[in-house]
Amino acid sequence: MILIAVVDDDYGMMFNRRRQSKDSALRERVLSLAGDGKLWMNAYTYGQFSDSDGSAICVDEDFLAKAGTGEYCFAENVPLDSCEEDIEEIILFRWNRKYPSDVRFAIDLGDSVWKLTKTREFAGSSHEKITEEVYVRV
Amino acid sequence: MSVYKKKRVVLIWLLLFGVLLSGCAGKSSLKDDSPQNEQVSAEEKKSDSDIEETVNLTEQAENTVLTDSFDLSDIPEYSGSPYIPVNGNVPDFTREDLTTDSFETYSELDELGRCGAAYASVGTDLMPDKKRGSISKVKPSGWHSIEYDNVEGDSLYNRCHLIGYQLTAENANEKNLITGTRYLNTEGMLPFENMVADYVKETKNHVLYRVTPVFAGDDLIAGGVRMEAMSVEDEGEGILFHVYCYNVQPGIAIDYATGGSWADGRTASGDTRKDEINNHETKQQKEKKATYILNTNTNKFHKPSCSSIKKMTKANKKEYTGSREDLENTGYDPCKRCKP
């Protein structure tokens, strides 16, 4: 699977069971990444895609286990450390802001397992600068 | 506040008052929840019927047992996190508080010159369209200009907006600025302001938002601030929190009564002169006569206003007037809650 996640400056993802932030430009980017392929997510994440034309979206609470090779998974409020072995690639978006957090991105990108291969920046609809990073296995 | 904003505030309060008079809204706690009354105790603030009316609009709110609002004695000592949840992260707003009209209100300063609650329904129309102006002419209660090498940006204290500039565009409003540490400003409050500001910008929704500085007794420096927020149009689905942010600075000790400070023994400041000045101020404070309440069982001494005194048995309670230094020399330690 190809994991997609969004973090703040402290690798935070959620606070009080709510996503830290959202941005329509980021959603469009996620949909364009998936293209005609499958984009897996749970019902909570689908809440922000429900108005999108996302025919590729598959909604399932056990989506991390069901996603196949080369398929995208957008994860916001689920533990990630237990599925790390199944991840082929990580696409990490950064808000470049500091928000409160009580759920953080649990995969250590600083060790010898993952390597940053691409970085791009784009303006969000409400965020000045969103950074997109692509990590692949070493 | 701009004239436009003032007009909006007056209009909103008139409308709300009208609803109250007409009886259409049923029993309302609007008056009890106005910012001017924020510093009354939790018991005084909410009756049982008010609690029943407290907003239960989200699943989380519905599943949370609402308590008697905020009680400082429930807040643990700072232990490394800049903020902690209060009341299961459910704010104390009432159903009648929710409005899709933007407004902002700021409490009058009290007799000690201290800020009270700042309260707003934040919408895009209140947000700034230009860079922040100077706020340096405002001297909030307990203000000291003091620098330490181990503080980011050197200055221990910032003029902390209760409602951040990015939310309501308030510049040098003395009713919206408190003396807060750099740590409170950037690690405690700013992340919550960012979250609310970006939510409002993205959704064009409103967020009901209240920030209340919490002072112990006659302290001039707040021990922390209580921050509450709830998104209005989606009834808390996007934004819902109720937290207490500590007005502390790791490595620096603060005398909350006066604003004096000194390098904490655990961390060297590297600035002996500044430490000496502050230690001198602290020594003067110690030699000054004052009245304390002693607990002869625990050998702690308290401010007469300390909430711990209520729990003290009569046999252990004793009043003392004299210097703090003499008291400490006889083996008494200051209460960590009221910090006499």
Image (cartoon, grey):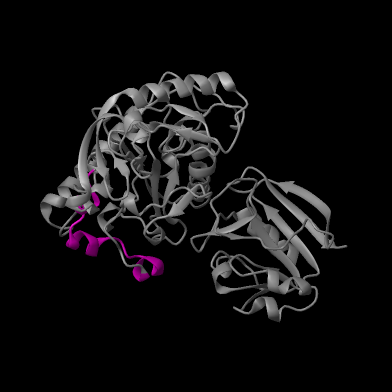
Residue at 55% over, 35% down: B265
Quarter of the figure with residue B152: top right
Visible residue check, residue A85: yes
Closer to the camera, B139 or B82?
B82
Closer to the camera, B155 or A53?
B155
Marker count (numbered): 0
Q: Main secondary structure of the magenta part?
A: helix
**Image location of residue B269, percent across then percent down:** 60, 29
Compared with B76, B10 (above or below) is: above
Closer to the camera, B121 or B224?
B224
Residue located farthest toward the front when viewing the structure as drawn: B330
Closer to the camera, B53 or A138?
A138
Q: Is residue A46 left or right of residue B27?
A: right
Quarter of the figure with residue B26: bottom left
Q: Quadrant of the C terminus of chain B?
A: top left
Compared with A19, B276 (above or below) is: above
Residue at 32% over, 67% down: B65
Q: Quadrant of the N terminus of chain B?
A: top left
Q: Is residue A13 left or right of residue B173?
A: right
**Image location of residue B124, percent across then percent down:** 45, 42
Q: Is residue B173 left or right of residue A38?
A: left
| B223 drawn magenta | no
Residue at 43% over, 49% down: B77
**Image location of residue B319, percent across then percent down:** 20, 38
> Which residues, given as a range, are shown in magenta?
B40-63
Visible residue check, residue A35: no
Residue at 23% over, 27% down: B111
